[in-house]
Amino acid sequence: MFPKIITIERHILEQQRMHPEATGELTSLLYDLALAGKIIASQTTRAGISDILGATDSQNTYGETQQKLDVFADTIIRRMNDHTERLCAMASEEHENIIPIPPRYGTGKYVLLYDPLDGSSNIDVNVSVGTIFAIHRKRTDGEHGVVGDMLQPGRDLVAAGYMIYGSSTMMIYSTGQGVHGFTLDPSVGEFTLTHPDLRIPEPGKFYSCNQGYEKYWSTGVQKFTKWLQGLDESDPDAKAFGHRYVGSMVADFHRNLLQGGVFYYPADMRKPDQPAGKIRLLFEAQAMAFLAESAGGYGSDGVGNLLDLQPHELHQRVPVFIGNRHMVERAEALIREHDQAWIDRYMAYRSKTMETA
Ligand code: AHM
Ligand code: MG
């Protein structure tokens, strides 16, 4: 029998048909992102051959040196989406301010937030990297999008997903109805459905964190790490989970989505004035928490559901604990029990008032 091939285009269209009110704009936007992913993949797999490895002379808004591929991926996504009339603004981890739609083009009803190349410090050593995207509906009046359109809780996302550039290129996305995975067949240049309706397997198998920093974590997070290693004194028979850490959130999340586990990146206690850690709420965490929940898992900032956070600034940071629900809830319980001083500092940061510019 001839196998049934479901391309990403067909899949997105079939999803659209379940919403008779849909205009097709989201469908086209997701397809544009898939195309951008193919172009980025074609360069990441050639990195080292074409002159695209290494650092540029510039830094991004966090003062981090930009890699050439970071800039390339950022430009591709921006250019593929600035003229389609589906977006009213974009925001990228690599840009301090929102990216307006050029005045010569029309605007649309969505905003796109993206991390063009997550884990980019891994590029030069041939380790998987990815692109993360999140789509919200415009919520302010006026033709052009403003920061306020970006500062929406993850709960209100219309769609989110990522591309992973690894041993194969995959695109994973959700519009809230299941999480679906597609693999790029490089011989025909199409993403085809290979992982329909992904659910995080129970029980989880792995924990993923930069354990080299354990001594800088709060007591609750250290106790959580001991529990994951089966070293919790109150439970001598506890089993140990395996430890895996790539250092690209997309790759660590992807493995845990397929095999079960928890990814966490907590705050560093050496920096009491930065109680939210490293991961960016709008460019990284919201999309991953949305996918996790759509796949039966859970994403938390250590205090509560990541999807319920009202963001206050574009480049806001957030501690993350994402994966199998029972693992994430264990982290929350231990943080509640041991880390009140950190919770107070973090909640003061979390509840800052929103930028409205
Ligand atoms: P990036 O977006 O600048 O690449 O940074 C985010 C990355 C995550 O993908 C990864 O989980 C984390 O930073 C790794 O940080 P560390 O090197 O501190 O473990
Ligand atoms: Mg990133």
Image (spheres, grey):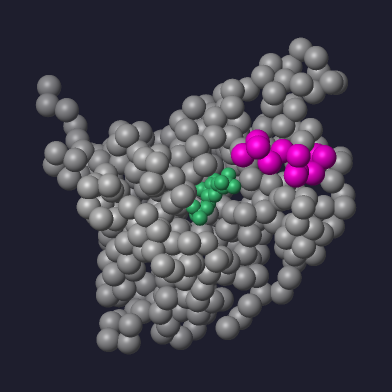
Write the residue at 49% across / 27% down.
Answer: 259
- Specify whether 10 is left or right of 296: left
Considering only vertical position in the picture, is 298 above or below 90? above
x, y percent for residue 342:
82, 52
Instruction: List x then y, in percent, for residue 219.
Output: 82, 40
Give the image quarter of residue 71: bottom left
Residue 299 part of the magenta-drawn span: no
| Res. 174 in view | no
Front in this rendered view, residue 289 or 348: 348
Residue at left 31%, top 73%? 82
Left or right placement of residue 118 versus residue 304 in this view = left
Q: Is residue 228 above or below residue 96?
A: above
Q: Is residue 149 left or right of residue 308?
A: left
**Is 211 within the magenta?**
yes
Q: Quadrant of the C terminus?
A: bottom right
Quarter of the image with the N terminus in it? top left
User: x%, y% of residue 116?
Assistant: 40, 58
How many dots with numbers? 0
Q: Is residue 270 visible?
A: yes
Residue drawn at x 51%, y 73% as measured from the top left: 96
Q: Is residue 45 left or right of residue 319?
A: left
Residue at the far top: name it: 237
Q: Is residue 263 above or below residue 121?
A: above
The front one of 231 and 320 is: 231
Q: Main secondary structure of the magenta part?
A: helix
- The residue sitting at 36% across, 35% down in the picture is 196
**In the image, which residues are magenta?**
210-220
Report the front residue among 313 and 214: 214
